[in-house]
Amino acid sequence: MSSIEFNEATGEEIGLSIVVHLVSLVATSFLCNLLVPIVILCITDSPFVKNQAREALNFQISVVLWALICVPLCFVLIGIPMAIALTLAAIILPICATVTVLGGKAYRYPLTFRFIKG
């Protein structure tokens, strides 16, 4: 887990970044997990919020890809612990991101494919 330093993040920037990270824990569909970061990425001018929206979006896409990798591996049993680890990561990492963002620092998700770049 590394953090990228930005100039002082304002309260509004921190608030939007928290929404971007926590939406995956409260959303009822994968579509919401993608739409919220995309919308926030499009409407904000803040480099800090844009960075965090890209991170959250890349993480959500990566979770789906890792889940697709786990499915066939479940037939040889290695996919079961991988799926459990992925589920835990999908719950714990957005919380870690939120705590980091609350401190005014940018969060970078580990083991994430970087499809959306800034």
Image: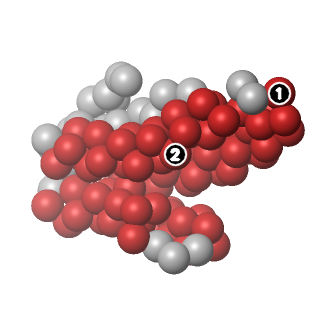
Q: Is residue 94 visible?
A: yes
What element does badge 1 sit on? helix
Question: Is residue 67 rendered to the left or right of residue 57?
Answer: right
43 vs 101, left or right, is right
Q: Which mark is residue 87?
A: 2
Q: Which image quadrant: the N terminus?
A: top left
Q: Secondary structure at mark 2?
A: helix
Q: Earlier in the sequence, mark 2 or mark 1?
A: 1
Left or right of 112 on screen, residue 95: left
Q: Nearer the viewer, mark 2 or mark 1?
A: 1
> What amino acid does circle 1 point to?
Val
Position of the C terminus by quadrant: top right
User: Residue 29 falls in which quadrant of the image?
Assistant: bottom right
Q: Do we see residue 54 in this rendering?
A: no
Circle count: 2
- Mark 1 sits on what residue? 76
The vertical placement of 49 against 63, above or below, is: below
Which residue occupies the foreground of this view, 59 or 72? 72
**Where is residue 51 shown, x and y percent of the image?**
44, 46
Viewer-side residue, 95 vs 103: 95
Q: Amino acid at mark 2?
A: Thr
Gap in angstroms between the C-alphas marked 2 and 1: 19 Å
Residue at 75% x, 29% y: name it: 77
Residue 57 in the image: x percent, y percent?
Answer: 56, 53
49 over 30 or under it: above or below: above
- Judge from the rendering whether residue 74 lies leftward or rightward of residue 1; answer left or right: right
What is the x, y in percent for residue 71? 79, 43
Categorize mark 2 by other alpha carbons within 10 Å: few (<14), some (14-19), many (20+): few
